[in-house]
Image (tube, helix red, strand yellow):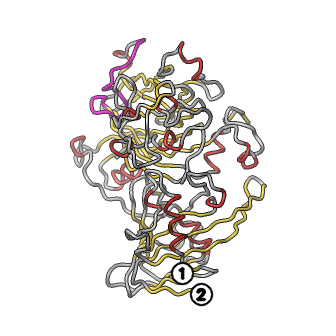
Amino acid sequence: SGLDADMWFYNYVDPSWRARVGGDSGVYSQRGGKSIYKDYIKIYSPSASTTYDVVQFASGTHYKTLSDQGNMHAEDLARVGRYGSDALYNASNPYAPKKFINGVDTTAGTGENISFANGTLKGKPGNYTLGESNPVGSDLVMKMDGWIYVNAPGTYSVRAADLHNYVELTINGNTQKFGSATTFINPSTEVSYGKNGQWWSRDFTFNKAGFYKFDMEYMDGTGEMNLSLYIMQKNSAPASGPYPIDTLVGSEHSGTRLFSNNYVEALIQNDFIKKIGTTNSYEINTSKYSEANFGDPVYLKQEGDVKGGNLDDAFVYSKGRAIDGKGGVDTLIVVDDVDFSNLDNVKKINNFEKVQLGSADQAVSIKFSPNGIFDIVDSRNTRDASNSAASESVNTVLKVIGDSKDLVQLTHDFVKATKADITTLNNKHSVVGDTYNKVDVTSDGDAVNQVYKATFNRQEVINGNTINSKHTVFVEIQDGVQVDLL
């Protein structure tokens, strides 16, 4: 359960991506009445992904890891969407959150990075994965996608609080806007608004108790990446002042629950819910299901094209079927011989971190090219923590799971990765949340499994512009699997 959330870290005035969005100069520019950030998130893969059971988070300059100005420190960006011990201060981790007050380091390991000064917990995200080795930027775009369950009909007031910039929320086709995509509260002058920004309220009407499609876009260009989304029946909501903390969207006493697209699709497949009229909403089929069943396992049939969520998913490969693992650490199960050096076989396969070769009693042969691995993993070039240009082309690793009956063939100049190569890769992927991109090594730094790498040039045409890039991809093949270099 929970909404899937994808995040993009960037600097809205950075000229490096202007060519890809048609030469426009910033996220606040408009083209055809549309904010440029909408083009940005279509062109670039997400920087990170997570899930939210409650719509609330906080990071930014009030929780700044470093006392300098300008771009946020990597951890200020990477902590959005993390929760619990993963977000706490750790002196051995150079990326671990600290808290600065007036430029003074107050590192105490108290977890203040995930709360405001009053101690209010900021959200319960989970299943965090980071797609960039060194998050860089001053700005955040987040897109949440899923379903909201409302346990009683009526008109509700939804309040976006702690907001410095912009939220666009669509529930059951009704789109409401909070704040502005073209203006924002400048942190240097925010004292008149208070530390937590401003709030806006909008109304949504639900004709029945049930599941309603929920899509939200959040944008911040101020360095104050905060949001608390509340919901109350309009006739009991205060006209001013804060909403009670237990009315956060998705929280236990709010009368709402949040669910992923795949969970609701499974409910539909199993006839546990039924359509409300002609709308994109569903009510519970009380003869088979009830609110008491929320959280019970529900099995999803893989029918037609498949898109995962931001959990750790596993899908069986079927030639010609589009399968997008999306967020999380996802496994593609291959039960028949397949040639993934033929790009026609991988162009519909996206966002997988692992490939499993059949079951214990199967012998599977698979072939990879560097381009094919790059397409399966869908990684993006980023630099390491030292901002080394040489590290930029060193990409993530595809992990292949199998046994001695299986065969992996590698084409186009793959070579055995050296210990130094593996150290470079693992050092690059050192930010909390990015460990799944590391190669397994012994205490001496030697690879546990078989590791190969290949460097290649890639050319893409985006918006009529030719983009050239260099990539080094890695493949980690379980020890014992047969490997042929072709």
Taking 69 as reference, is 391 above or below it? below
Q: Residue at x 23, y 49 (%)?
A: 288
Q: Is residue 271 visible?
A: yes
Q: Amino acid at mark 1?
A: Lys
* Numbered badge on residue 486: 2
Residue at image mark 1 = 367
Q: Give the residue type that dot 2 points to.
A: Leu
Magenta stretch contains residue 48:
no
Dominant secondary structure of the magenta stretch? Answer: loop
> Is tag 1's residue or tag 2's residue first in the polypeptide sequence?
1
Would you place residue 87 above or below residue 68 in this image? below
From the viewer's perspective, tell me whether residue 321 is left or right of residue 479. right
Quarter assignment of residue 457: bottom right
In screen coordinates, is 442 left or right of 45? Answer: left
Callouts 1 and 2 close, C-beta under 8 Å: yes
Residue 472 position (above or below residue 36): below
Q: Quadrant of the C terminus?
A: bottom right
Q: Residue at x 33, y 40 (%)?
A: 283
Q: Is residue 437 above or below residue 157?
A: below
Nearest the eye: 64 or 324: 64
Separation (CA) of disc 1 from disc 2: 10 Å
Dot 1: element: strand
Identify which residue, 289 or 429, lies in the foreground. 429
The reply to whether the magenta stretch includes residue 240 is yes
Q: Residues within 10 Å of mark 2 (few under 14, many from 20)?
A: few
SS at badge 2: loop
Can you tell which quarter of the image residue 147 is in? Answer: top left
Q: Which residues are magenta?
A: 239-255
What percent of the width, then of the height, locates residue 308? 44, 57
What number is the disc on residue 438? none
